[in-house]
Image (spheres, rainbow, N blue to C red):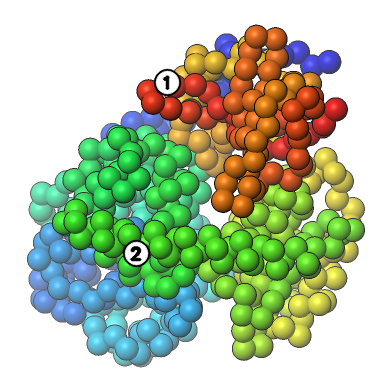
Amino acid sequence: MASLLTKEEIRKILQSRFENDGCTRLGEIPKPSSLKDIGRASKRIAQAIRDKERIAIVGDYDVDGVISSVILSQFLDDVGVAYTLVIPNRFTDGYGLNPDIVSKLDVSVIITVDNGISAVEAAQICKERGIDLIITDHHSVPSVLPDAFAIVNPKQADCDFPHCEICGAQVAWYLVASLKEEMGIEYDLSGFLDLLCIAILADMMELVGMNRVMVKKGIVELNHSKRAAFEAIKRYFGKATLEADDISFLIAPLINSSGRMEDAKFSYTFLKTRNVDEALQKLDYIVSLNEARKEEERLLFESTLLHVNEEANIIVAWGEEWHEGIVGIVASRLSKRFKKPAIVFSIKDDKAKGSARGVGDVDILELIRSQESMLLGYGGHKGAAGVSIEIANLERFKYNLEQACAHFTQEMLESDSDLLGEISADQIDFELLEILENQEPFGQKNPKPSFLLRNILVKVDRLIGRDSQHLKLILQEGSNALEAIFFNYDLRVKQGDRVDILFTVSRNDYRGLVTPQLLIKQIVRKY
């Protein structure tokens, strides 16, 4: 039997994650000048500002893209510069800068934020029309780059920036820093940290080095922020303070929902609103969009269950007009429920656009890449990816992937790299909660630790949630009673059962009484 972890061992394991961090405070983050082309970009924009040339910003409809747009546009507002803002609509425009968007802009300079690194065709049209295109992005660099005036992207091979895993909003923020220097003006860049911590967490950046520093400081700034949007969120949801989990599970989904369901401009104007009453009105509408998103997600999830092949080690499902903004969330739910990678496509006009999620040790991007010859496009990383394909190729794509995954073992599919080890119930207390909270924020490269608890008694069981889809348990070992919740449970247990569970620990603050609460990831065994 494996030895049980002590709290001191947990503390040491977690602290060891940051032993090699070269950046531990804001003063140590890289200078803007280490980003390739940033000087060229800021010189051109500064010239356009001086000469009163027409400028356009083209953003993206996810959290990172919306916040990138807010950062650059707010800077231009603050220095009194007029501009045109375009945030493409997921349903009518598609992703990023494209020829249609360029054709509608009568400007001298286009600045992309959180997109553009693949906009080869749009860049060519800019060139033909005499528009200087400045691309700021953080996505993987394709083999053919757009012919742009300047490209600021830390992932370029000849870029000296030491941290290539930063989000689009951070690149936009660096552009503002470079512009401030170029224009020789005083400007408080720390005023954007409240927004940056949301973008970094929402875009699932690695939470080590400068990203960790910026998120930790950003959460402090978020709680002192003068932005009407964040005051509105606190009031609306009755929050005295906002924490990392509030960003991941409340703020980011809200900001994302308008782009998923209607138009990201709703979230953009919400974040830029200066009046709290106005912000509350806008928030009320965004909350309604998020509720609609949850309902769409529930219905679509139920539809996809009919397409699950229990024998295969991957789920590939598609349907006519399935909601394009929801397929990624549904793929995530499928992969968690069935412990298999999942790809969900929405079919429209002879094409299928899909979102994919990996599990365990499975690299979903590599699986998709293996079928590159039949794809219209794809991109992403090991855990999540996007893909588009012609409908005629869907069946072959599904067959090929099922064959490619046939050799996957259960261990490979269920591997949990976040598992620290086995723990006893008497170690789960307020002190453990403090140890864990000292290591926040959790995310990529600093995952929230999971623990294993064996053979513990279910003292009380209760179904909760509007559709009784969640399971609330009181678990008991000796004199230790622990509260646990299993969201969207997939195995029902009842009073008197004994269970092995895989879980994380979170804070439960009820009327001022703080206790640890277990969030069950998996009921490993029921006795």
Q: Position of residue 230 (x, y in %)?
A: 28, 48
State the residue at coordinates (74%, 45%). Answer: 490
Q: Which residue is mark 1?
A: 513
Could you tell me which residue is drawn at 72 percent across and 25 percent down? 458
Can residue 244 be seen in this snapshot? yes
Specify the quadrant that holds the C terminus.
Answer: top right
Q: Would residue 231 be found to the left or right of residue 208 on screen?
A: left
Percent position of residue 370, x then y: 76, 66
Residue 217 seen anywhere in this rendered image of the structure: no
Q: Residue 148: which disc?
A: none
Mark 1 element type:
strand
Relative horizontal placement of residue 66, taking residue 225 as reference (left or right)? right
How far, Cα to Cα, is label 1 from label 2? 33 Å
What residue is pinned by disc 2? 285
User: How far across and how far down the image is residue 329, in percent?
Assistant: 59, 59
Nearest to N terminus: mark 1 or mark 2: 2
Quarter assignment of residue 414: top right
| Residue 282 drawn at (x, y percent) | 28, 62
